[in-house]
Amino acid sequence: MSVFADLVQHLADLLHPLFGATAAAAAIVLFTAFVRLLVHPLSRAAARGQKARTRLQPKIAELRSRHKGDPEKLQKAVLELHAEEKVSPLSGCLPGLFQLPAFFLLYHLFSNTTIGGKANELLGHDLFTAPLGGRWADALGDGGMFGGAGLVYVGLFLFVTLVATFNYRRTKRMMAANPVVPVAGTGAMTKVMPFMSFFTLFTVAVVPLAAALYVVTSSTWAAVERAALYR
């Protein structure tokens, strides 16, 4: 972790002439963008998978009619169709799964007071008046909702709500235009999917601000990326 801490610190030093005291926050945003670029091929593959599943809908409609009175046979037939066409119903989860290590690395980096036996200097960096190692609860206890740090979180919450609302409307439109037959284990996920982006609000509220910046940047990137890939 000390190597990653040095990387973030060096990147912050490089960005300091442009961003001043918020250079570390800018470094985290830039790091997130780099991770998203690495994951982009998986996102493109997930988009191709979604389009392939959409093309299968006429065949799935036939299976639905054929096995109308037997849900178990319908689920099995749909799974067999996906396997035959080499389409994974869960391929869309891969981009998120491959980002988890980067998120947890930032989480631990800004949750520890020491790194490699030395004081964690990154905890001295802020986003405006909010410490990158602090949480929303800390901001509420130091000036309240509309204190300096509290206002940083208010801005983040408003921004996340805008992105989540955009994702919700786009996902609902896509699901209405391309209804799918849920396969085993995905029925509940399909119902929850339009609301997934709003879970980001909870994440931002409970993790260190540095990790929250990663989540906000990544979710915004994903919203723009999906709008382009699924248009």
Image (cartoon, grey):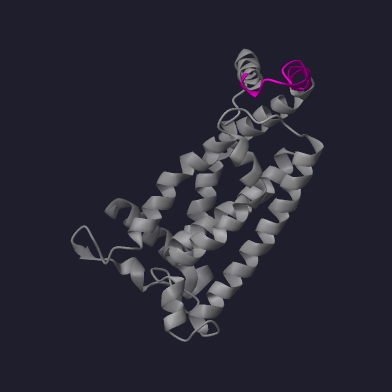
Quarter of the C terminus within the rendering: top right
- The correct choice, above or below, for 78 with respect to 50 in the image is above
Pick whichever, 117 or 226, lies toward us.
226
Count the numbered circles shown: 0
Image x and y of residue 15, in percent: 48, 64
Q: Magenta span has 229? A: no
Please tell me which residue is depicted at 34% across the width and 58% down the height of the picture: 109
**Residue positioned most to the left:** 117
Query: Is residue 23 found left or right of 122 in the rendered image?
Result: right
Q: Residue at x 75, y 48 (%)?
A: 170
**Horizontal side of residue 195 vs 96, given as left or right:** right
Q: Residue at x 78, y 19 (%)?
A: 65
Residue 15 seen anywhere in this rendered image of the structure:
yes
Give the dominant element type of the magenta stretch: helix, strand or loop.
helix
**Residue 231 in view (yes/no):** no
Give the side of residue 60 with respect to residue 89, left or right: right
The residue depicted at 54 percent of the width and 51 percent of the height is 33
Left or right: where 7 falls relative to 205:
left
Relative image position of residue 185 (x, y in whole percent): 55, 32
Query: Looking at the picture, how far across and down is residue 174, in whole percent?
Result: 76, 41
Looking at the picture, how far across and down is residue 41, in whole percent?
58, 34
- Above or below 206: residue 31: above
Q: Does 71 lie within the magenta span?
A: yes
Which residues are the magenta region?
59-72
- In this orientation, which residue lies closer to the viewer: 89 or 124? 89
Q: Is residue 223 above or below residue 208?
A: above
Q: Residue furthest top?
A: 84
**Rendered image quadrant of residue 131:** bottom left
Foreground: 154 or 129? 154
* Position of 56 relative to 202 (above/below): above
